[in-house]
Image: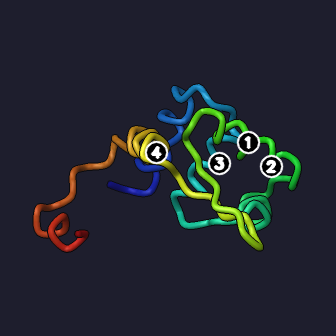
Amino acid sequence: MKAIDFACHLLHALNEEPHTESMQRVLIGLAAGLETSADIARCLGLTPSTCTICLRRLKAEELVADICGDWCYYRLTAKGKKLVAEIFSFLPAPHPSCAKNAT
């Protein structure tokens, strides 16, 4: 798959997904490994307040869970991981040998 194909498929998938653009960015940021609200906002070009609102709404939909101690860290729930997988469902299935290495 060429980069332009990937970009077009991703934009189409995001256009079909019902969440706001900011919420989609937060979901993909979490899937990419960002964990804190500050990191998500900084890396994705969101204001801190927009990021916080998105995280709260995604948490209310049970797509995101938080782990709070000295800092709050955010993770995708199983439901959130499924949604992100659906967004990227246009990607070809991994080769069986790659799937074995992922476990």
Residue placed under numbered mark 3 in the picture: 25
Q: Residue at x 53, y 29 (%)?
A: 17
Answer whether labels 4 and 3 touch (C-beta < 8 Å). no
Q: Nearer the viewer, residue 11 or 43?
A: 43
> Is residue 73 left or right of 95 when viewed as pictured?
right
Residue 66 drawn at (x, y percent) = 64, 55
Amino acid at the residue labelled 3: Arg
Q: Which mark is residue 84?
A: 4
Amino acid at the residue labelled 4: Val
Question: Mark 3 or mark 1, which is nearer the start of the sequence?
Answer: 3
Find the distance from the CA under tag 1 to the CA under tag 3: 14 Å
Element assignment for label 2:
helix
Q: Residue at x 39, y 45 (%)?
A: 85
Disc 1 residue crowd, few under 14, some 14–19, many 20+, Cα 10 Å = some
Location of residue 6 with respect to 40 vertically, above or below: above
Residue placed under numbered mark 2 in the picture: 52
Find the distance from the CA under tag 1 to the CA under tag 4: 18 Å
Answer whether labels 2 and 3 touch (C-beta < 8 Å). no
Residue placed under numbered mark 1 in the picture: 56
